[in-house]
Amino acid sequence: MVSPLSLSKKVCVIGAGPSGLVAARELRKEGHSVVVLEQRHDVGGQWLYEPNVDSEDPLGKKKFLQVHSSIYASLRLISPREIMGFTDFPFLVKKGRDTRRFPGHRELWLYLKDFCEHFGLREMIRFNTSVEYVRMLEYDEIGKDLKWMVKSRDKSSEEMVVEEVFDAVVVATGHYSHPRLPTIKGMDTWKRKQMHSHIYRVPEPFRNEVVVVVGNSLSGQDISMELVEVAKEVHLSAKSLNITEGLSKVISKHENLHLHPQIETLQEDGRVVFVDGSWLIADTILHCTGYSYTFPFLDTKGMVAVDDDRVGPLYEHTFPPALAPSLSFVGIPRKIIGFPFFEAQAKWIAQLLSGKRTLPSREEMMRSIEEFYRSRDAAAIPKHYTHDIGDFEVLLLISWIHGQFT
């Protein structure tokens, strides 16, 4: 549905990573006045590598983290560059740079810088600015002409606090920063070193150590492969011992790499006891257990909540029905072809705010969300996988979103 009127809104985008950058571009293209608030000194979000992690809590338990990026030094893309770029700005090979089809993380950061410069986005971004609080202004009827107060702080001047009112807020802060930790008996009293992979960067600090890596996801396997070259022993603890043939071959080639079931308990003398009764004494436990959604700055009076990694209720993983379209989220889904998806969301948000498109009624959006939840429950998919929608579903959702404005 197309509206004959095009409205210009004052919009705050939180985050200048891939989702925030493309959101800013699409919003400006629709004629909106855009301010992007970015806590780091440059664009890139996760892809802006941060080698200095000494200031961060090893397990990332603080409400506001000091370190945003979870990228480690050797990380390479697991998707080919052909599908990683935005639709009108392909991720091309550039002379003198990393020309591999699956390049290292720095190459993707340089691509994002190129994207930012090509479209002149930097002028909209306030760097070194942390968002401390976002709340709705009081209105008689929630969802009608809603406005938002955004409180931010210039990190170069701790006393400089700015409060501004916006017509809309787009949350584009990513979801690979705040550690998701397992619950292990004795974890809080174990006296040796524990850390989350959020602050893992290079293997050298683990030289000659006995390291237990918890979790055999892609990052757990990748980091274990690095550690075997320097550590005395690496013990990979997995939920299931039914591993891929490839991982089995890798383990067989390294005498110091061992596979174990889950940990049952951690004991104060340094022992790590597994559920099969076996145990060892470790120097370090490295949790490669994923990340949680968190929006510590956002106050929606309970209208948007995070429950076991389900952010909701969100219509098509983007809009909370009671607050749409003035509040939106870009980049919530996981296991996706990210950049084209972010772009599709950004176009949708921008055109909804300008009045060119409309959303279903609040009741219709809630019914759609409830049907989606029921379908996940019927498929026995745990709640914390709500936003793992898979590439095929992503293609369908991107096509559906594109169909709203093409």
Image (cartoon, grey):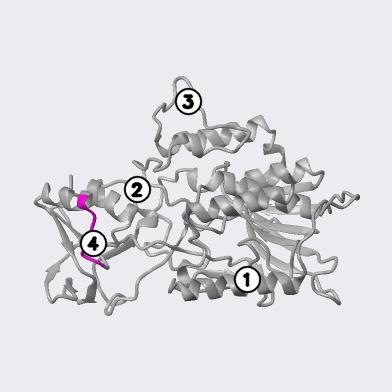
* Label 1 packing within 10 angstroms: few (<14), some (14-19), many (20+): many
Q: Estimate how packed mark 3 is, as few (under 14), some (14 to 19) or many (20 or more) residues with alpha carbons within 10 Å.
A: some
Q: Which residues are magenta?
A: 240-245
Mark 4 or mark 1, which is nearer the start of the sequence?
4
Q: Locate the C terminus and report the quarter of the image it occupies.
A: top right
- Determine which residue is flagged by label 2: 201
Q: Residue at x 43, y 74 (%)?
A: 380
List the residue tagged with mark 1.
369
Q: Nearer the viewer, mark 1 or mark 4?
A: 1
Specify the label residue 229 is tagged with: none
Which residue is denoted by mark 3 in the rendering?
Answer: 93
Rendering coords of residue 41 (x, y %): 57, 43
Question: How many angstroms separate mark 1 from mark 2 (CA)?
Answer: 39 Å
Sequence order check: which comes first, mark 2 or mark 3?
A: 3
Mark identifier at residue 284: 4
What whole-number distance in Å separates the C-alpha atoms at marks 1 and 4?
42 Å
CA neighbours of label 4 inside 10 A, class few (<14), some (14 to 19), many (20+): some
Mark 4: amino acid: Thr
